[in-house]
Image (cartoon, helix red, strand yellow):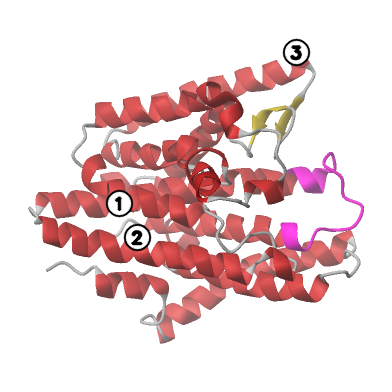
Amino acid sequence: MRLRHIDRMRAIAILCMVEVHTAAIVPPEGITVGHPAAFVAAAFGGMAAPMFVTISGWGMYRSASRRLSEGHSTVQWTSWIMPRVALLCLCQLLVNLLLNVERGGRFEWHTPGVLTLLAISAALCPVLVRATTRNRSLAMLAFGISPLLLGSLSEPDIGWFERVGAESAEEWFARLLLNGTYPVVPWMFYVLLGTVLHDLSADTTTRERGIVFGVLATTVTLALSVIEEIDWANTSGEAVLTFFPASMPFLIVSGTMVALSLRILEGDEETGGEPFMGDRLSFLEPAGRLSLTIYVAHFAILGAVALMMEGEPRLALVPAFFVTILHTLAWIPLAAVHERTIPWFSLEAILRLGQSSR
């Protein structure tokens, strides 16, 4: 059974990703970190990747659970996992080439990223699906506190282009596992969160208690920011919540917001009713079902924009805002038209073709 609130959640995640990536390539002139517009963009950016990874973990775990219940053989598991891992890795390489630093972009061609994280998650699915909810919850907790244990291994002081670069195989694996943009430690936290949320789909009481606890913890991080007189959230540097590298408070706060968003969008669907706002949000669903294709395709557009804008002055606030919003929202009708006309022409269709049950 297709759950509509999951498609909507996936759509919101990918649209937030498009927004923050577009804002990074087309930054308005004269906007500082403290500007309200910068705060709004950062808020979307801070939620986009956690939401995207969590809902991807939810989906992979759901598929793996079905295969486990059907008693799939080792060959069948391999035929499901390997095409997914290969496609995700190839898509990561394609994204890196589309937005390469040599053409005004943000990535080296070999940069590990969110899709390599998902590829590793896919490879681990047979293990995750055999673990109990309790054990996965404990593993999620371990990844949640891992930023406290990593220390200098997370390299909190390096800049963006160092974080996406690697001078050796050893450094590349360090970027993949510990200190890249989306390293396995601690970002596997969100994949595990997705599996736990899946298991608790019918237990709204437990999920809501967890959300309340998370909101209380979020309040503590805000109080800490005030008491210590430091920024509450920053992409990196001195702040309670940091994205690069992901701090423990960031994992807690963003994980709470993801769980809360999912609960709101769910409405009464898990109990046989309608998702939040019924059919009024159904226009988002095609974009959710096309999220991987949109993720890769929007980088093709941004790569061309980065190349054209290289060396050019920044846009003023209003034109930059208009371009960002237009590029973000355009994927909603495009996804709907795509689903009606050429649904077979997408990365998701390739996965379905290569991973159909046998």
Classify 60 as above or below 294: above
User: Which disc, if any, is residue 227?
Assistant: 3
Dot 3 or dot 2, earlier in sequence: 2
Q: Which residues are magenta?
A: 24-39
User: Which disc, if any, is residue 85?
Assistant: 2
The quarter of the rendered structure image containing the N terminus is bottom left
Dot 2 or dot 1, earlier in sequence: 2
Residue furthest bottom in the image: 341
Q: Residue at x 78, y 47 (%)?
A: 38
Q: Quadrant of residue 89?
A: bottom left
Mark 3 in CB contact with mark 2 (< 8 angstroms): no
The quarter of the rendered structure image containing the C terminus is bottom left
Dot 3 or dot 1, earlier in sequence: 1
Given the image, on which type of amino acid does mark 2 rest?
A: Val
Residue at mark 1: 123
Query: Residue 340 colored magenta?
Result: no
Q: CA distance from mark 2 to mark 1?
A: 7 Å
